Each structure stands twice: as structure tokens, then as C-alpha cells.
Image (cartoon, rainbow, N blue to C red):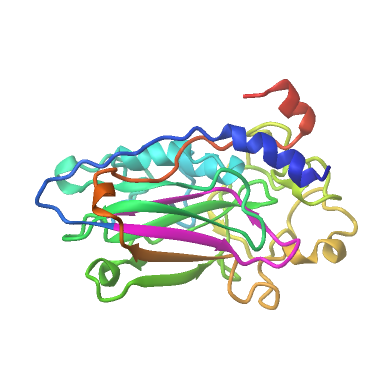
């Protein structure tokens, strides 16, 4: 059995599905949006953890370069765990303000946010995940879109939009267009959370790539880095314990190579969809929950979660 299959089967058991209901005034109009994330990496290229996504009014800022990561982003970047960032989003936290603090935005200033997690296990090259969300379309409540996902294998690398208003869906919500698509993780646009020392001995996702070693055996295993968010300029060049054959046998992991990744790591497509009227009261249909990357088979047997 391949390392990938050994990893994937236990990981699917780590997802705790939750139904996230939306409550809105009867005067609000709603739209169903399908979000699809496709991994564009070449064969044997980088993989992604399940992708957290959120629709909001521009008040949720997931990270700022040069500042330290909030706990929810740290969990996502180190272990692919979206539980904390989902809770913080649902609780109306700004996540990052000018003083590098999380603070709650008064409910009178924030509309009903809508978010969730796409996928239940690792998203390998050439594969995709999708989910359906019910959002408000008559005002700015859900006008802006955010996303975040861990890049594998790594200790704490991730892709996300640091600018909370970077992806404006007003044309989609106003029915000017029916679909929008954009590439993420383009060369030079992957981040280091600065929370864990970059070391392949404790890198999550290693079993996906035979020859890298067993890597992380339990969540949060690596040594704290006590750093700040910064752009990854040389992919894995600064990782400790790199295999001697890394640059040759694992060349497709170089996500900053414009030849290998001309369109980035992934493509996100958001599309308006028609839903039968009998289904319009089901609320948000999306998956959220806990996704922890336990990568050693021995650890998985002793810790069945």
C-alpha cells in the first residue's frame, strides 16, 4: 500500500462535519454559490490541506506580512486544522487589526458571515474539492471572499489572501457575471506562518512523497519558530534535514518555479447556481470541522481519534 493511501484513510476520519445554518431577515435575497478549488500542481507537486473559505463584509483579515500569526492561522498552517479559524470567523473577529490583535467587531457593524471547509482529506495534484454556500446578495454582507490552506509538505507554509477585500464578488452577486475564477499560490505568493521551525523531520505531509521521511508524527510537533508571517522566496531552500537528492528527485515541489507553476498552486472558481425552490431553506451547505495531519502510521494506530 502506498504512503498516500496509508495517510488518506485515517485523515478522512478526522473530519467532524458540521451544519452551518444561516439566519436572515425575510427581506434579504439569497444566492447559492458553488466554490471549487482545483490543485494545479504538476505530478508529484505540492498538495493542499482542506481549504477554509469565508464570505464577509471586508472585516476579516487573516494575516499581515511582518506580523505574528493568530492561533487559528497557526493551526491551519502547521496541521491543516481549520476548526479555530472557522470559530473565530463565525464569532465576528477581525483577526488582525493595526496592533496585531484579534478583536470582535460589534454585531451591528457586521452582517451574517458565511464560511466552511472544502474537502475532508489532502487535495493532491490534479484533484479538486467544492462546496455550496447560501449567501446574502442584496447588500455588502457577503461581498468579499477569503480562503486559506496549508501547503504540503511543509512545517507551516500556507496560501491565503492577506487583503480582506482583494476578492470582490459584487459583479457575481449582482448577476452581472455568473462565474469568477482566479489563481492562487502563484510563484512568489506562498507564505511562512513563522510559527514552527522549517524542518523536514517534522514536516506534515511527508508520507505523500516517498523518500522525504516520515515527518510529523503528531500535531504541533515542530519546534516553535517565534517568527512572523513572511513570503517564501525560495520554496524549501531554508528547510533543515533536506534529503541529499531533494533538488533532483523532488523538483516538482518548487512552487516558486514559474515553469512548473505558471498558474500557481490552485485555481478557485465561484459560480452562481440554480437551486430548486424546495431546497432554498436548507441554509448553508458546506463542510467544516477538525482536520489534523497525523502522518505516521504508528501514531495513527495508537491515536485513532
Residue 17 position (above or below residue 66):
above
Q: Name the image quarter holding the C terminus.
A: top right
**Compared to 86, does 46 lie above or below?**
below
| Residue 220 image point, x, y percent | 63, 34
Q: Nearer the viewer, residue 187 or 241?
A: 187
Q: Main secondary structure of the magenta part?
A: strand
Query: Which quarter of the rendering shows the N terminus?
Result: top right
Q: Count the numbered circles shown.
A: 0
Percent of width and height locating residue 140: 20, 59
Q: Nearer the viewer, residue 290 or 243?
A: 290
Q: Is 51 a magenta residue? A: yes
In depth, the one of 13 and 238 nearer the eye is 13
- Residue 63, horizontal then vertical, whole percent: 44, 52
Residue at the (78%, 42%) spot, across then down: 201
The residue located at (62%, 67%) in the rendering is: 40
Q: Residue 231 appears in which quarter of the rendering?
A: bottom right
Residue at the farthest top position: 302
In the image, is 147 to the left or to the right of 282? right
Res. 99 visible in picture: no
Residue 66: x percent and y percent?
49, 55
User: Which corner quadrant of the image does residue 233 belong to?
Assistant: bottom right
Residue sitting at x 18%, y 41%:
107
Q: Is residue 238 in view?
A: yes
- Span highlighted in magenta in the image: 32-56
Task: Locate residue 300 relative to residue 94 in the image: left or right.
Answer: right
Residue appearing at x 53%, y 47% in the figure: 119
From the viewer's perspective, tell me whether residue 232 is left or right of residue 147. right
Against 201, residue 304 (above or below) is: above
Q: Left or right? Give the position of 138 relative to 64.
A: left
* Outermost residue toward the right in this view: 244
Can you tell which quarter of the image residue 302 is in? Answer: top right
Amino acid at each position: 500500500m502506498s504512503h498516500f493511501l496509508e495517510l488518506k484513510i485515517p485523515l478522512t476520519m478526522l473530519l467532524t462535519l458540521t451544519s452551518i445554518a444561516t439566519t436572515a431577515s425575510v427581506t434579504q435575497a439569497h444566492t447559492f454559490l458553488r466554490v471549487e478549488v482545483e490543485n494545479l500542481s504538476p505530478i508529484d507537486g505540492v498538495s493542499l490541506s482542506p481549504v477554509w473559505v469565508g464570505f464577509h463584509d471586508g472585516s476579516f483579515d487573516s494575516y499581515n506580512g511582518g506580523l505574528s500569526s493568530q492561533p487559528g492561522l497557526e493551526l491551519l498552517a502547521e496541521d491543516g486544522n481549520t476548526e479555530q479559524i472557522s470559530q473565530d470567523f463565525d464569532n465576528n473577529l477581525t483577526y488582525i487589526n493595526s496592533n496585531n490583535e484579534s478583536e470582535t467587531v460589534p454585531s451591528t457593524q457586521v452582517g451574517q458571515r458565511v464560511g466552511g471547509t472544502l474537502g475532508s482529506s489532502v487535495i493532491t495534484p490534479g484533484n479538486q474539492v467544492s462546496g455550496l454556500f447560501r449567501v446574502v446578495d442584496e447588500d455588502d454582507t457577503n461581498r468579499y471572499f477569503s480562503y486559506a490552506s496549508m501547503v504540503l509538505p511543509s512545517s507551516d507554509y500556507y496560501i491565503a489572501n492577506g487583503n480582506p477585500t482583494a476578492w470582490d464578488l459584487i459583479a457575481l452577486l449582482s448577476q452581472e457575471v455568473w462565474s469568477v475564477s482566479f489563481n492562487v499560490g502563484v510563484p512568489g505568493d506562498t507564505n511562512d506562518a513563522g510559527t514552527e521551525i522549517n524542518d523536514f523531520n517534522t514536516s506534515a505531509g511527508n508520507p505523500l512523497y516517498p523518500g522525504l521521511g516520515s515527518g510529523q508524527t503528531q500535531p504541533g510537533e515542530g519546534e516553535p519558530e517565534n517568527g512572523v508571517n513572511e513570503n517564501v522566496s525560495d520554496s524549501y531552500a531554508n528547510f533543515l534535514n533536506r534529503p541529499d537528492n531533494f533538488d533532483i528527485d523532488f523538483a516538482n515541489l518548487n512552487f516558486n518555479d514559474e515553469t512548473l507553476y505558471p498558474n500557481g498552486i490552485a485555481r478557485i472558481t465561484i459560480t452562481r447556481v440554480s437551486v430548486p425552490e424546495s431546497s432554498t431553506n436548507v441554509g448553508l451547505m458546506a463542510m467544516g470541522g477538525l482536520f489534523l495531519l497525523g502522518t505516521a502510521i504508528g501514531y495513527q494506530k495508537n491515536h485513532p481519534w
